Amino acid sequence: MELKKNDTHTLTITGYASNGDGVGHLDGMAVFVKGALEGETVTAALTKVGRSACWARLVRVETSSPARIEPDCPYYKRCGGCQTRHMTYEEELRFKRQRVDDAFRRIGGLEVSASAIHGAKNPERYRNKAVFPVSQDKKNGVQVGFYRERSHDVVDVGSCLLQSAQADKAGRIVRKWMNQHKIPAYDERSGDGLIRHVFVRTNRRGESLICVVANGKSLPFEKELVQALRVGCPKAVGIVLNTNTRQTNVILGPQYRTLWGQDFLEDRLCGLTFRLSIPSFFQVNRDQAEVLYNLALDCAALTGSETVVDLYCGTGTISLVMARKAGQVIGAEIVPAAIQNAKENAARNGFGNAEFLCADAGEAAQELARRGVRPDVVCVDPPRKGLDLAVIDAIAEMSPQRVVYVSCDPATLARDLKALGERGYCVQRVEAVDMFPRTSHVETVVQLSKGEINSRKVRVEFSLEDMDMSGFQKGATYGQIKDYVKEHTGLLVSSLYIAQIKQKYGIIERENYNKPKSENAKQPQCPPEKEKAITDALKFFGMI
């Protein structure tokens, strides 16, 4: 069958893509249909035909799934903020749990699955941070809302079911102020115009911190805007102007000026108090963040004496949750402002056992190695791109007994778990958390422990009596050499490196032990610092 754009076909939806689109098949090719649910029979029109997959527009549902519901948001079909409002919340949770399991199997090659997914008690109005892009429409004036999917066209949204009522109100006030005083919105193409975004933080008490992002250092009719926001948002604690004059998609610029009130907002999470500035990182769903962090704490299995390293600590949220039950916590983050916030948050909450380093994960690991710090637990909560191989190697070098991986992307998580598995870390526990209801995103917490990759062992018993021991090499086994090197230097060394150094000193290895698998294969050579460590071990065991 030749598949052509605009042709319509009837197909059965057998699963979901990672973004929540329904997936069917035509002539052996996957077809992604936005808005279709698993188990449905649909008629769809092809919009793009690729070499190995097709994309289609839903024309009609022939056989409906019991999980299908009418979207409760008038902007749903135009706005790109939500992806799952056409399905029940129970179906959304099933899709997200399956998304995690599929990534583990297909990308990581792991036969493990999430034992649970923790849904939100309230999947509406949960976001404590709103960022509304602003644009100018020739016909309808100023638009304040969200981008249409796969575009930078702003869909004007009067009220968003994911945002707080305070954020909605602030957006409407800025829109009215701009229209009233003919203040132009920023144009991404030309770089002209003034107002770029409206940024609102809201805390558990309903207080808000409002920021207007502008292509300039001042605002016309500034006092009128402040007055309108103070009247319309009576729980606002501060109004801030952020200046971003760069032609970039980055939302915030480097300069801030407080127009009224204070430039921070305090919020509570896991019983701790955090002071948040506009650029501070803070989980947007407090209630589910508490579920996530308490799950991470449980996976750390702390007894009170452990040293914990948090390699992507942000403003210190996970670090301080861990500090309650750890002997010492060391957080690392590359953003200086976040580290300053983390230190202040530790002091504010009375933690004397939390230290924070301004460094990337690899640099932090090297610094801790120089100090002789050997963590019992390493916690990572990386951005969507996951861990660099250098960070994975750094974790393996630190050799913690447990690793707690908090992930916002199942695909990069599965890739990284595979790499960690190759370095001796086994997945012990997987649970998903729905941090962002009504979107396709899902968070996952994984507990890994150091040990044999294959846990099945065979017990062999034999007697040494009457055995000829003359053929045994004097000295230590590979495992004993590795243990010695790790204990005295903190380095992890492979059997290959040990074999190379033994051969260098004339200790004969069994045939082909130290040869590459093929003649043309390149073989890694033992680096100098590991060569020295192995040499010291060989001397210790009397082998050289």
Image (cartoon, grey):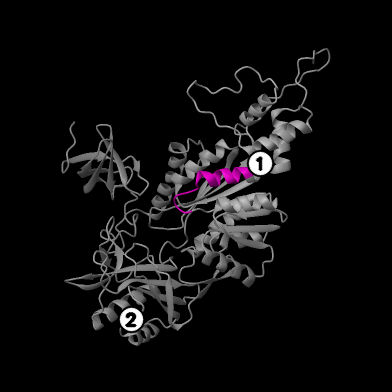
Label 2 secondary element: loop
Q: Where does the image place residue 31, in percent across and percent down from the top left?
A: 27, 40
Whether residue 389 appears in magenta in the rendering, the answer is: yes
Instruction: Identify which residue is drawn at 31% across, 76% down.
Output: 172
For the residue pair 323 and 116, the one nearer the viewer reads as: 323
Instruction: Please say if 499 is above or below 87.
Output: above
Q: Where does the image place residue 307, in percent across and percent down from the top left?
A: 68, 54
Nearest to viewer (mark 1 / mark 2)? 1
Label 1 secondary element: loop
Whether residue 231 appears in magenta in the rendering, the answer is: no
Left or right position of 165 against 297: left
Q: Residue tagged by mark 1?
A: 491
Q: Is residue 322 visible?
A: yes
Q: Kindly identify the amino acid type of the residue bearing the numbered disc 2.
A: Leu
Q: Where does the image place residue 231, in percent across and percent down from the top left?
A: 38, 86
| Image quadrant in which the C terminus is located | top right
For the residue pair 245 and 91, the one nearer the viewer reads as: 245
Instruction: Identify which residue is drawn at 56% across, 68% down.
Output: 340
Q: Kindly identify the amino acid type of the residue bearing the numbered disc 1.
A: Leu
3D distance between C-alphas at marks 1 and 2: 57 Å
Left or right position of 118 against 69: right
Crowd band around label 1 with a 10 angstrom C-alpha radius: few (<14), some (14–19), many (20+): many
In this picture, which residue range is highlighted in magenta?
383-397
Q: Where does the image place residue 50, in percent across and percent down from the top left?
A: 24, 39
Q: Residue tagged by mark 2?
A: 219
Q: Any mark on residue 108, and which? A: none
Instruction: Please say if 541 is above or below 61.
Output: above
Kindly indicate the quadrant of the structure image that contains residue 130.
bottom left
Magenta span: chief secondary structure: helix
Crowd band around label 2 with a 10 angstrom C-alpha radius: few (<14), some (14–19), many (20+): some
Left or right position of 237 against 457: left
| Lower position in the chain sequence, tag 1 or tag 2 | 2
